[in-house]
Image (spheres, rainbow, N blue to C red):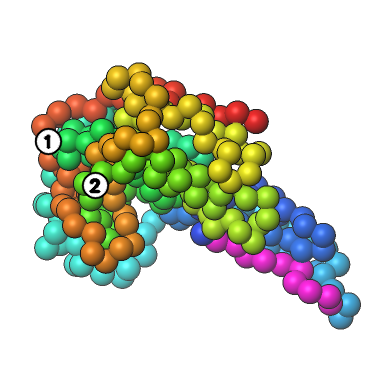
Amino acid sequence: MNGKELILTGHTHDALPEPVQVGNTMLIASGSHGKFVSRLDLDVQADGVKGFNYKLIPVFSDVIAPDPDVAALIDAERAPFKSELAETLATTESLLYRRGNFNGTWDDLICQALLEEREADIALSPGFRWGTSLPPGSDITREDLYTATGMTYPNAYRLEFTGEQLQAILEDVADNLFNPDPYYQQGGDMVRVGGMGYAIDVNKPIGSRITDMTLLKTGEAIDPGKSYVVSGWASVNPETEGPAIYDVVESYLKRVGTVSLEENRSVIVNS
């Protein structure tokens, strides 16, 4: 057997309906949030893997009886917080989802909250791949909000960045995702942006991917030498100051009552 013939991948949160074959190596990905279970049967012989059978099996939680002992343990742990988690903060008329290479409506909502609650010109939300979806007509509970924002470094900063610095941030994140060398790709999706539009060509080298940066509230081009008030969250800098992002979004949700998001067309992808 030469090298690795099977890799069980993770972190991307993607579900692959069949293995991806790279040379003699199979890549398996089973998604996230308990949506799928993978079954892989291998015909392993002395000189390597000679055959396989693979199934990506969807999990339908509403037709599976929970294990009573595990369910009781979960209920006991949740009991002190149940009423707080179940409180309705707002309702949504829009589908709220997280995944998308350049934007998702959960992050559009978060960015809008940052713009208004933190009185910012531009908002940045990290391209996280976790968080469940809410269909139109759903209540948004505090638990739903925590599902999209709960983390250990939640501070929502409010700082000034020049247009040049903003472009450098976008270029750096884009290079983490689209560098032609996979060893320099660090995963995740593109940072989400509120209050600003831009164009991106993923095939160009770093420093040349991001163009046409525009401040949406005025329609003016972002000036490299001008400073803009920017609010974002999930900075790994331990000295970051600001309220927790879930508190910022909760305040926004309680104020607006109903979430209705327009289609986000602020990012133009060129290739």
Residue shown at the point (43%, 29%) measured from the top left: 213
Q: Residue farthest to the bottom?
A: 46
For the residue labelled by badge 2, is the local secondary structure a helix, a strand or a loop?
strand
Give the image location of residue 131, x and y in percent: 37, 48
Query: Magenta segment, which residues?
Result: 1-10
Gap in angstroms between the C-alphas marked 1 and 2: 25 Å
Quadrant of the rendered image containing residue 181:
bottom right
Q: Mark 2 highlights which residue?
A: 159
Give the image location of residue 221, x and y in percent: 39, 24
Numbered circles on residues, count:
2
Q: Residue farthest to the front?
A: 225
- Looking at the image, residue 47 sits to the left or right of residue 240; the answer is right
Quick one: quadrant of the C terminus?
Answer: top right
Q: Amino acid at mark 1?
A: Lys
Quadrant of the rendered image containing residue 266:
top left
Q: Mark 1 highlights which residue?
A: 254
Depicted 82 relative to depicted 264: above or below: below
Please tell me the numbered disc located at residue 207: none
Mark 1 or mark 2, earlier in chain: 2
Viewer can see residue 97: no
Quick one: quadrant of the N terminus?
Answer: bottom right
Mark 2: give few (<14), some (14-19) or many (20+) Cα within 10 Å: few
Depicted 160 relative to depicted 155: above or below: above
Q: Nearer the viewer, residue 141 or 174?
A: 174
